[in-house]
Amino acid sequence: MIKSYNDYLMYLEADRVSLQKKKTLRSLFFDDIWKFQRLLRKYEYIINCNLNIVSRIITRVRLRKLESKLGFTIPPNVFGPGLAIAHPGTIVVNPDVRVGANCRLHVCVNIGTQAGTRSDVPEIGDNCYIGPGVKMFGDITLGDNIVIGANAVVNKSFESDISIGGIPAKMISTKNSDNLLVKGFRI
């Protein structure tokens, strides 16, 4: 969680490295995903450090507009440093979910609560690769260095350093996420 200006800068740099963005004007102004992630981190910094209410409102309005354009519903303070959103498209995340550092997230992902509950949400470790179309729900824990294959439905906990997939998800390999991520944050 971002608790200082130095944390804010560290999160931004980790996200930039994970997204493989160069420090160019083109990526700064014309890459909507990178713009969204920068705004999300700025909003986290503003709300966590209790900064100016006007800045909070302006940043939130800009963030909502970009969320609508890209199809994202990603609340603040969910993802650790090194977030990499691969493509624009529908991504829905419950505000109570916690995801560690270096998460690569693809389109049509839904991470939410168990039906009929408000607080039973997934907790996801560091260095996680979440493929397109993944659905995760319930009070589950996923370990570090995990790969979740496309269109998997994850409704139970899994250990670290494996690949999972299927409906419902099960272990399909002992291959971990090492070759699928650019780790912007060193743990």
Image: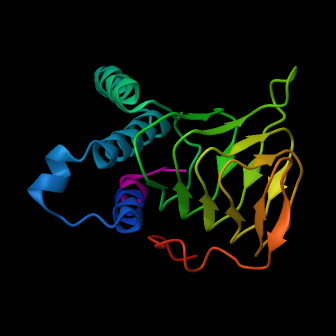
Q: Is residue 154 magenta?
A: no
Q: Residue at the spot x=63%, y=63% of the render?
A: 128
Q: Nearer the viewer, residue 187 or 138?
A: 138
Q: Bounds of the magenta span?
A: 1-8
Front residue of this view, candidates 113 and 162: 162
Q: Quadrant of the C terminus?
A: bottom right
x and y percent of residue 90 in the render?
A: 51, 33
**Corner quadrant of residue 43:** top left
- Picture quadrant of residue 49: top left
Could you tell whether 117 is left or right of 127 in the image? right
Residue 3 lies within the magenta run = yes
177 above or below 30? below
Q: Give the residue at x 86% y 23%.
A: 117
Which residue: 55% across, 50% down?
1
- Total labels: the figure holds 0
x, y percentage for residue 150? 65, 53
Asked whether, in this view, residue 41 is left or right of residue 124, the answer is left
Q: Is residue 12 above or below residue 117?
A: below
29 relative position to 163: left or right? left
User: Is the residue 83 above or below the residue 94 in the image?
Assistant: below
Residue 61: give x, y in percent of width and height. Answer: 33, 20
Q: Position of residue 113 (x, y in %)?
A: 78, 31
Colour scheme of the picture:
rainbow
